[in-house]
Amino acid sequence: MSEAKHTRIMPADGNRTTTDIEKKFISDTFDSFDKGKNGSLDPNDLPGVCQALDIKPWHLMRYIKTNEKGGDTKVTKEAFLDYWFDPNRPVSSKKSKATKKASKADVVRAFGEFEKALAKLKETVLAAF
């Protein structure tokens, strides 16, 4: 299993490193989705753990098949940890939604609503005096 690129010694924990803490977290997350408690995820368990860790199931399965780890349909804990700590694994990226440009009608409508709100504010201020 390859180590993460950045490993630091945690001052309060003696010899524990950030990699140790991450391994524990990922291992515990894997175990929480392993419904059969047999050390492997079947296809029904896979979407949940992938969503929890923000990874794509097809990236994981491609890695497993390419590196011939685990069985055909099950993902073992060892193979999953190898995937997670592989520095070359694909990382999910958030796609930003394209913003829609306002049309002329949108601008006119917004300006009309602004004028109404401004008139109401003026009435409220004048009524207060």
Image: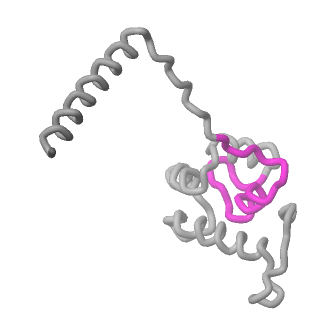
Q: Residue at x 62, y 68 (%)?
A: 39
Q: Is residue 49 left or right of residue 113?
A: right
Q: Is residue 70 left or right of residue 86?
A: left
Q: Residue at x 78, y 48 (%)?
A: 89
Instruction: Using the image as rendered, state which of residue 38 and residue 7 is in the foreground.
Output: 7
x, y percentage for residue 25? 64, 71
Instruction: Using the image as rendered, state which of residue 9 and residue 19 is in the foreground.
Output: 9
Is 75 a magenta residue?
yes
Quick check: can you spot residue 1?
Answer: no
Q: Provide the residue span drawn in magenta.
A: 69-93
x, y percentage for residue 110? 34, 21
Q: Quadrant of residue 75?
A: bottom right
Whether 93 is drawn above or below 36: the answer is: above
Q: Residue at x 34, y 19 (%)?
A: 111
User: Which quarter of the rendering shows the C terminus?
Assistant: top left
Quick check: can you spot residue 56?
Answer: yes
The overriding secondary structure of the stretch rendered in magenta is loop
Whether 74 is drawn above or below 112: the answer is: below
x, y percentage for residue 74? 63, 54
* The residue positioned farthest toward the top in the image shown: 104
Instruction: Using the image as rendered, state which of residue 20 and residue 30 is in the foreground.
Output: 20
Q: Quadrant of residue 116?
A: top left
Is 79 a magenta residue?
yes
x, y percentage for residue 79? 74, 59
Q: Is residue 29 left or right of residue 92?
A: left
Figure disc tally: 0
Q: Is residue 19 left or right of residue 108?
A: right
Q: Residue at x 15, y 45 (%)?
A: 128
